[in-house]
Image: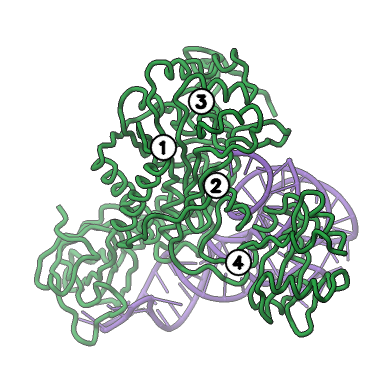
Amino acid sequence: MRTAYCGQLSAADVGRSVKLAGWVNRRRDLGKLTFVDLRDHTGLVQLLFADDRDDLQSAHTLNREDVLVVHGTVQRRSAGNLNLEMKTGEIEVRVETMAIENRSKTPPFLVDGDGSDATEETRLRYRYVDLRRDRLQKALRLRHCIFRATRDFFSERGFVEVETPVLTKSTPEGARDFLVPSRVHQGSFYALPQSPQLFKQMLMVGGLDRYFQLVKCFRDEDLRADRQPEFTQLDLEVSFPDGPDEIYGLVEGAVARVFRDVLGIELELPFPRLTHADAMGRFGIDKPDMRFGMEIRDVSSLFSRSGFRVFADAVASGGRVAGIVAKRCSGYSRATLDSLQATAVAAGAKGLSWVKVEDPVVSSISKFLSGEELATLIATFEAEKGDLLLLLAGQGIDKALGELRLAVGRKESLAVPGWRFLWVTDFPLFELDEEGNLASAHHAFTSLRPEDYDKIESDPLHIPSYAYDLVLNGTELGSGSIRIHSRELQERIFRRLHITPEDADLRFGWFLQALEYGAPPHGGFALGLDRLAMIMAGESSLRDVIAFPKTANAMCPLTDAPMPAAPKQLAELGISVEEC
RNA sequence: GGGGACGUGGUCCAGUCAGGCCUAAGACGCUGGAUUGUCACUCCAGAGAUCGCCGGUUCAAAUCCGGUCGUCCCCGCCA
């Protein structure tokens, strides 16, 4: 048994006889005297091998990452030999016996360091070495603490963690499913869950009352730095909620508990709220980064009768004129403005107008606007000398305005440090998909206010739903909703989505039936724990908080998954693969 | 599906734009030796790369062109 961990030894242990185990971080061989930094998950401690012992001669042969178990005595270092850079630098362990448990080949990269000295692919191929690094050790332990605090929080409040199937049926949630072929039922497939959505609703029907689960979800879509094909959610659902407010309170409590237990940070509760419509109007995005202001301002009313046709026509045809003030940015070069224009155009704007609030004013549109109009514009924006106005006109310019705001915010490093949580509420129930068909904005089980039921048929695009997102520093952390618990209303929604009764029966018949057997009102939430861990760890990629992540191409360099299946396996499954 | 960046000893990279001076430089690591207070130990000596892969252009290709594989970032996509 080990009697101590390397990184935890201190001057208080001087004189102790200890047994340590770990990896050779580095050897400094002075001939008659050999120093080895021994590493375990707690840190480093210096081992001293004196050359007066024949049975310790093998210390001269130690290499990086060799695995040792040593006995020795903790001794204070003499005054001139302290290492103040090192946590355990006041002491060292004079080794009395050593067992070399394993020799290591030269590792492909050094374990000290933060990873910037190896490519991501090398790190993933040798993930077991990478995991020894402080950075990943910290991240995975932080992740564990998040999980533990979460489980504590919900357990203390009467929630039950229930596992839901991984081999299941395709759920209607937008993303592509991962399919698993059935051997017993050749030609049929299970789907891996994109979320346990319908199962947690079943648990509510089943009287579990309050459910949570830390659960893997799977979505077969292209990856990003903040998107992996398998990821972990905190999934929760409660029966008889007092509307969304009860869910907000629970999630806020859980997040605050996590920050307190894990980082020792007290979050201010409740989190601010913004309706989806306000978020879009003021920030041009449904997940505003609240670490800086620079809100979008609508100035359509100034231009409805303007001589400037571009602006006047935009207003007349149902669009608007709006923009942001970039404080102290009037010095932007033509190239910078061009690149901002490119950002706006890529996001759907027709162009970009700018006004440099200088003396005199310099503007891309000064020859179209009267001096009075320009002055009114600047006054409306409350812009001061040295500021830059960025203006867009037309329809559907929210997104472009939002992109502009983020681009300037990034360029000017406007985001203040901290944790800015935000609820975005009242997402629309329906939206139009790329083919112009009505689709659920959240998912088809989202409820709405009774007074809006009539609009399901008459005005579906203007129904605020009981769906909400939690946003942290401009990242979507999770979403949830109050669900439909009546079969009649659920079928009405399906009908509106042009899901035929036959189709609904085939895909969700079991679910619709359950709603007829005493389904209680219920609602819940799902929060991406990988993203939370990433942000709390200060990382910018999910790969740095997941033990064994996939590359951007959804491959695993460690195992070389995915692999072609063996012909015998395929035959058992009744599957033939076309040569590509 | 689209756009961008990248791929050179074990690792990270210089060299690629302007082909020949590249018989490919450097750092770290590695090997052998020396070394009693190091802690990024030091000193001496040394090994290690057909420049991701295939094809093309050329007297000549790490360098130019085409294709392909892989990594990273972004758009689409992901309620």
Q: Which residue is mark 2?
A: A551
In the rendered structure, which disc, 1 or 2, sits on the residue that comes first in sequence?
1
Q: Is residue A439 left or right of residue A112?
A: right
Q: Give the x, y percent position of residue A365.
A: 83, 70
Q: Give the x, y percent position of residue B74.
A: 64, 53
Task: From this view, report whether residue A319 is shown above or below residue A109.
Answer: above
Q: Are marks 2 and 3 on the same chain?
A: yes
Q: Chain of mark 4?
A: A
Mark 3 belongs to which amino acid? Answer: Ala
Q: Secondary structure at mark 3?
A: strand
In the rendered structure, which disc, 2 or 3, sits on the residue that comes first in sequence?
3
Q: Please name which of the two marks, 2 or 3, marks the residue nearer to the observer.
A: 3
Q: Which residue is mark 1?
A: A524
Q: Is residue A495 left or right of residue A509?
A: right
In the rendered structure, which disc, 3 or 1, sits on the residue that comes first in sequence?
3
Q: Give the x, y percent position of residue A169.
A: 49, 22
Residue neighbourhood size for the residue with mark 3, other residues' Cα within 10 Å, grouped as few (<14), some (14–19), many (≥20): some
Colour that chain B carries in the picture: purple
Numbered badge on residue A191: 3
Q: Chain of mark 2?
A: A
